[in-house]
Image (cartoon, rainbow, N blue to C red):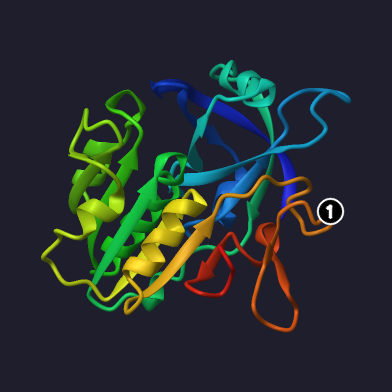
Amino acid sequence: MMSKLMTVVSNNQIADAIFELKVHGDLTKNMKKPGQFVHIKAGTGTEHMLRRPISICEVNREEGTFTMLFRREGHGTEMISTLKSGDPIDVIAPLGNGFPVEEAQNTALLVGGGIGVPPLYELSKQLNQRGIKTIHVLGFQSDKDAFYIDEFNALGETYIATVDGSLGTKGFVTTVIDHIETPFDIFYSCGPKAMLKALTEQLSDVKGYISLEERMGCGIGACYACVCHTDDEAGYVKVCTDGPVFEKGAVII
């Protein structure tokens, strides 16, 4: 884990306020586990002291590049969205504990909501490489918010849910899962807490791992901005260092 200057390869808007940022540099060789994230410096000098945590969407070790998808929703991510090819970018990576791909036996269900979808792409690729069949259920607010559908389709059967019904099934990811007939032995998920809570209740008898989206400060476990509560003696975990991925039931959501 270290801070390095990397180089922007491309930065394109792919959906409503969603950007695909591809960067090149040495840190890529350390990115091995899907579900990890990076911390990006948004500005220069004292402006935007806190870095922005963004999940890793895809890693290409041969090219020495990795791809992130992020939502432009504040001044920091607004600045990141203006980066152009060739620009330097200050990155700390990789951070956190990712998804355990080795836990899947035959078929894995991958469930993503909104900006929780991106880390599931590298996860699905790595599961496929291990011979694991992947089923994807992706939830978005509307069709204008949807992205990477073709990319996921190329890796396995893919279902879409939108709240307004403008794409795929009207409703939520849980609505779609009720109708999936293919058996699966494990699920992996990333998205808003309400979705993760509903999902873990729905799939109470299936082994699963969830990735939490928490606002972070330091990204290295020092500031306690991203603490989540647990039932054990410790009473809490830090999402940035203990997570962002936890086994189902390990944290209170």
Q: Is residue 213 left or right of residue 117?
A: right
Q: Position of residue 55 (x, y in %)?
A: 54, 46
Which residue appears at 65% of the width and 55% of the height? 95
Q: Return the residue found at the far right.
A: 46
Circle 1 sits on which residue? 223
Which residue appears at 35% of the width and 33% of the height? 141
Q: Foreground residue, 200 or 226?
A: 200
Residue type for callout 1: Cys
Element at label 1: loop
Q: Quadrant of residue 90?
A: top right
Q: Is residue 32 visible?
A: no
Q: Position of residue 159 (x, y in %)?
A: 20, 47
The image shows residue 90, relative to residue 182, as above or below, that is: above
Q: Position of residue 176 (x, y in %)?
A: 21, 52
Q: Return the residue found at the far left.
A: 181
Which residue appears at 38% of the width and 57% of the height? 123
Please identify the quadrant where the C terminus is shown. Answer: bottom right
Q: Position of residue 183 (x, y in %)?
A: 16, 72
The image shows residue 24, relative to residue 121, as above or below, that is: above
Which residue appears at 39% of the width and 60% of the height? 198
